[in-house]
Amino acid sequence: MGKRFIFTGGGSGGHVSPALAVITELKREMPDSEILYVGMAGKAECAMVPKAGVPLRLVKSAPMPAGKSPVQLAKFAVTLTLGILKAIGILLSFRPDLVFATGGYVSAPTVFGAWILRKISFGLFKTKILLHESNVDLGKMNKMAAHAADFIAVSFPETIKSLKAEKSFYSGYPVRSTISRHDKSEARKTLGIPEKSFVIFAFGGSQGSRTINRVLAEAAPELLKDPDIFIINGAGKPFGSSGGYDGCKDVREILKKEGLADNDRYLLKDFIDDMGLYYAASDLLVIRAGAGSIMEVCRQGKPSVIIPITNLANDHQVGNARFIGKLGAARVVYEEPEALSPTGIAFADKNEFIRTVSELKGDADALKEMSEKAKNIFPGNPAEIIISNIKYMIGEAPKPEPVGCTLLFNDRLIGLNSVTLESFMRKVSNGTERPLDPDEERLIKSKIRLLFVSKNPIFNARACRIAGIAGFCDLLPSVLGFAKNPESKPFTSRDAFQALSMLMTGCEERFRDEIVEAVLLGIRNGYYETRFNAERCIPVFEKRFGFSGEEKRRLLEILYKNFRDRAFEVRTEAVSAASFIDSDSSVIMKMLQRCYYDPCWKVRISVMKALRHLSENGTITPETALTELDKILITSTGYTTEYELKQVYKTVKTAISTESR
Amino acid sequence: MIYTLLSSLFENARGFAVFKYLTSRALIAFVTAFMISLAIGRPIINMLYRKGLRSFERSYGEVNSQKKTGTPMMGGLIIFITGIGSVLMWCDLTNPFVLVLIAAAVWFALFGAIDDFLKIKYRDPDSGLSRSFKFAVQIGFGLFLAFFVLNPDISPLPPEIANSFQIPFFKGILFNSTPFTAAFIVFIIVYSANAVNFADGMDGLTTVPSICVFIVLGTFAYIIGNIVHSQHLLYEYIPRCGEITVFCGAIIGAAIGFLWFNTHPAEVFMGDTGSLFLGGVMGTAAVLIRQEVVFIIAGAIFVIEITSTFVQEVVGFKFLKRRILYRAPIHHHFQHKGLAEAKVVTRFWIISIMMAALAIMTIKFR
């Protein structure tokens, strides 16, 4: 009797096509098996599955709501419960030997239905569950379903680390073998491309990618100056009748503007039927980092420039791209949002793109090495690996040998949100984490720029803080923009000044006047934390650039007003800042004397330090400083305790551990 | 239990009659609870430390001789065990008021302990019970209490007092309204549990204000539960609620016993186990004697703590995107300004003693 299989998974084509690839292979291997696909109405599977000649049943499901709103959660729970009940019905009537799920919330009802049946049927219902994960990092659904599954097939060797080793195996991402193989020169002849050209083939999937199209079209004038370069652009066409982004039209407009509309070395296509032909003809690919495209390109053994979509769930495209990049099979160019533009549309920096491409073009050895590495990343035939494991699971074959994996590495930057990114950067700057490499730095800068253009002022503020902690001086203009903008929310301007004081030491001379202007505004700001953070910039600025006499006069006028500020931190920092820039002993001493009995002792500490500083730089004599010091009220309410025992514990521990070494 | 044993002797032996009086039993419960805490405090602290139930920092840091990291948490267990132990010994366990208070104590201490345990297990102050779950626990008990007080079939309170609203400096009942009272009871429970929780942030900061509140509540319970005193002082008489005095006595004893270890520098923190428990019980006691406003006055410190947190986080962070106080809750505001911890705590004690005195004063000024 033939075995029976249920396939499920969907939502997007990326979850359906691996399932279909396995189905095709399965039909060939076990022709008498019965196959059923369980999907959800109105999703990609409804179009793709019937076309492949597989029967389709529908269940309800819903994605996990992003927020914590109880109404949404309740709705989600009800929908999922209904879906699971229906799926249980399907499972009981079909009685499959194995459920194969490719992830996505569409697969949730079937997987959990099968799991529940197994739990409550006392061994009568024996269906096995096999999951497949297409990205480097487990999706939400697969993370939960991993407990229910018997086995998990992963597309990237990297993923096995976050799973139980005995439950997971590497398979790769199954693609239907429809890609034709061609000879390079023949393919070029067919497409009418000169034999000697360096062919760049860029495509962003069937719907096209705005970022890839734009960076390519904008870089074209520069790139095409090189007579060898030939560009093929699969710009995509809008999906269905709903309009959407029309890549071809977009690219054509840009090209027209650049005067390249009819250039015969820029081949613009809306849709590409025979990918194999184009793959064969090309030298370098420009792609997005979806699991499918990466896998396909690597199996073709082509070097590529990857532009991942940032800001996706789980950062999975960035994760995929960095994985391939670290293995040396591709270069990664990150998206950047339009700096401070209201729309915040992402783009890739065209200069960086041009630099990467021309670097690769001039280095044939590097290209060769990249394509060698690409070929080896995903060994074996994914569908075959999965089938042999399916056979093992239903008891028809012995356990297959695991396919060798490429080296693994730990990506510490994936899945960081703005809060965790900040604490991560703190760890980097205090040495708990190892320093950033240049690629990581680029990724983090791109993340910070995304936060800069966010409409939420809390994110803007956090971006400033992160930039400050990391010491990214090239981000200074944005930070300065927030500091100077009187519309900035209190937290944003506060953190902008905080970052400013950290970035100033390494910044360029040309920002000098803008910084002075910002500081002059900042120390008069309505919010006390902004005021004192701006005041903190003054000593740093004095050390780095030095104020002119006129600037000092204007600053001191405001600072002396701040000596009487209501917030003690403003007074503290005003005292310290004034001692750095005022060289007229009579004025500053008169002002300081007013603070000798300040109700807050922290201000008095600052006064003492100011006296020290003044005597050091010779504004007052040491004798005056000493007499003045004795006039200050030194009774205070501050007092720090020490735990003697903990002190001894520490000394003993360090002593013993150094001795033992 | 001892009370039940002895009650059979009241008739026969003259010497044992002393146990019949509320005041004497309250004092005995007080002393008992205190003595038990002294006896079991040290072993419990050692046990907590050994089991790793210690306070932590977000990151595994070096031992810092100025920081409190590593101090055992969940010291609320000491208050709970000794307080409830003493209550079981010296209270009339057939009294419905006492039973509801014990229920409150167990309910809040249980969820507080779960919260503490989760936090310590994951070494992360955010991975305890979620905010909404805690609210559900508090609102759940508030609804139960409202039902208990307002349902004439099971309520030990006379119906016209059960749904009354009384305020200090004003004789008798201000107005009667069942829906208002139900909502108000839920509010008081949620408020008191949270407020005490927020106040718990420095050595001894929660303990003494709680003691003050329990003294006030005990005094009022005694007056309201006594037919002569309540008539004389123009309070609405609630039969049998005098037993709450004994309960308060026991909790005060337990809290003082805990303070023995908790005073600066603390050897143990009460954690959510203690703060939710104290907050929940004091709110319940205030509701049962229908003196919520007096409770709010006596616990002014808690009002300040919760208001400051609300103002800072909701008004400041959410809407204005700025700080309003230097730090919140307010004790950290003063600490940031430069007041040593011991000074902040003592000043808060002084304020709470003054507010308790004011609350007691309202008895005569009516």
Image (spheres, grey):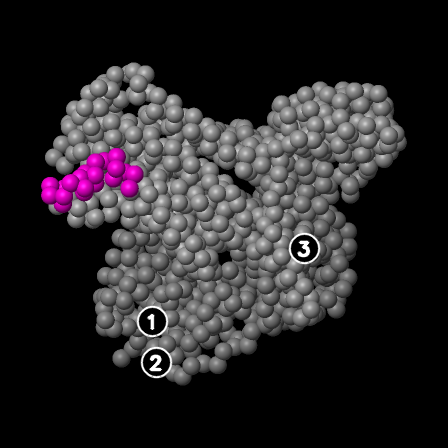
Amino acid residing under circle 1: Lys
Residue B288: % across, % down: 24, 33
Write down the residue under mark 1: A128
Q: Name the element at disc 3.
A: loop
B230 lies left or right of B129: left
Amino acid under disc 2: Gly
Question: On screen, A601 above or below A412?
Answer: above
Position of B241 with respect to A43 (left or right) is left
Q: Front-most of B304 and A430?
A: B304
Name the dominant secondary structure of the magenta segment. helix
Q: Position of residue A233 (x, y in %)?
A: 62, 53
Q: Is residue B21 magenta?
A: yes
For the record, the magenta segment spans B9-28
Q: Residue at x 67, y 25 (%)?
A: A598
Q: Earlier in the sequence, mark 3 or mark 2?
A: 2
- Callout 2: SS: loop
Instruction: Work out whether A237 lies above or below A597.
Output: below
Residue identified by numbered label 3? A431
Q: Is residue B179 visible?
A: no
- Residue drawn at the location 24% of the way across and 44% of the way down: B90
User: What is the three-letter code of the residue carrying label 3?
Assistant: Gly
Residue at x 51% of width, y 60% of height: A137
Q: In the drawing, what numbered circle is on residue A395? A: 2
Q: Earlier in the sequence, mark 2 or mark 1?
A: 1
* C-alpha separation, residue under disc 1 versus residue under disc 3: 47 Å
Q: Are marks 2 and 1 in contact (CB under 8 Å)?
A: no
